[in-house]
Image (cartoon, helix red, strand yellow):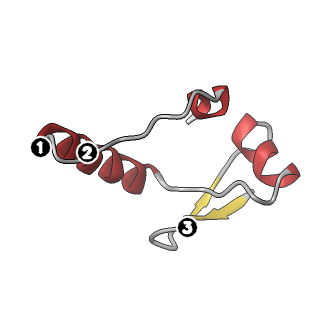
Amino acid sequence: MRVQCVICDKIEELVDDTLQAKRLRNRPIHTHMCNECHDRITERTKERLATGSFRFYRSSRSIEDDF
């Protein structure tokens, strides 16, 4: 399955049998983000949290545990 990153428009290939591919097929609202963009966002979020002036509102929903 070919997917495109939402942020950088990089096209990647996913194995059709994976859970992520199934989610993208069955629920069109789910989007794909490549590993490089995901890692970059994670690092920058941690940097903003370390400054102390950034508020990170965590949800109590179990859906966010999947991300």
Residue type marked 1: Thr
Q: Secondary structure at mark 3?
A: loop
Judged from this view, the residue extending furthest toward the right is 26
Q: Which residue is mark 1?
A: 51
Q: Earlier in the sequence, mark 3 or mark 1?
A: 3
Q: Residue at x 24, y 50 (%)?
A: 44
3 vs 1, front mark? 1
| Eye-nearest disc, 2 or 1 | 1
Mark 2 or 3, nearer chain start = 3
Q: Which numbered disc flags the more N-terminal residue, 2 or 1?
A: 2
Check disc 3 and report the residue beneath it. 6
Type of amino acid at the residue the image marks with label 2: Glu
Alpha carbon distance from label 2 to label 3: 18 Å
User: With 44 as the anchor, is 1 left or right in this view?
Assistant: right
The N terminus lies in quadrant: bottom right
> Is disc 2 surrounded by few (<14), some (14 to 19) or many (20+) residues within 10 Å?
few
Q: Which residue is mark 2?
A: 43
Q: How many numbered marks are there?
A: 3
Work out whether 4 lies above or below 13. Answer: below
Q: Picture coordinates of residue 59 (x, y %)?
A: 54, 34
> Is 9 left, or right, of 13 in this rendering?
left
Badge 3: residue crowd in 10 Å (few <14, some 14–19, many ≥20):
few
Identify the residue shown where x is 61% and y is 56%: 32
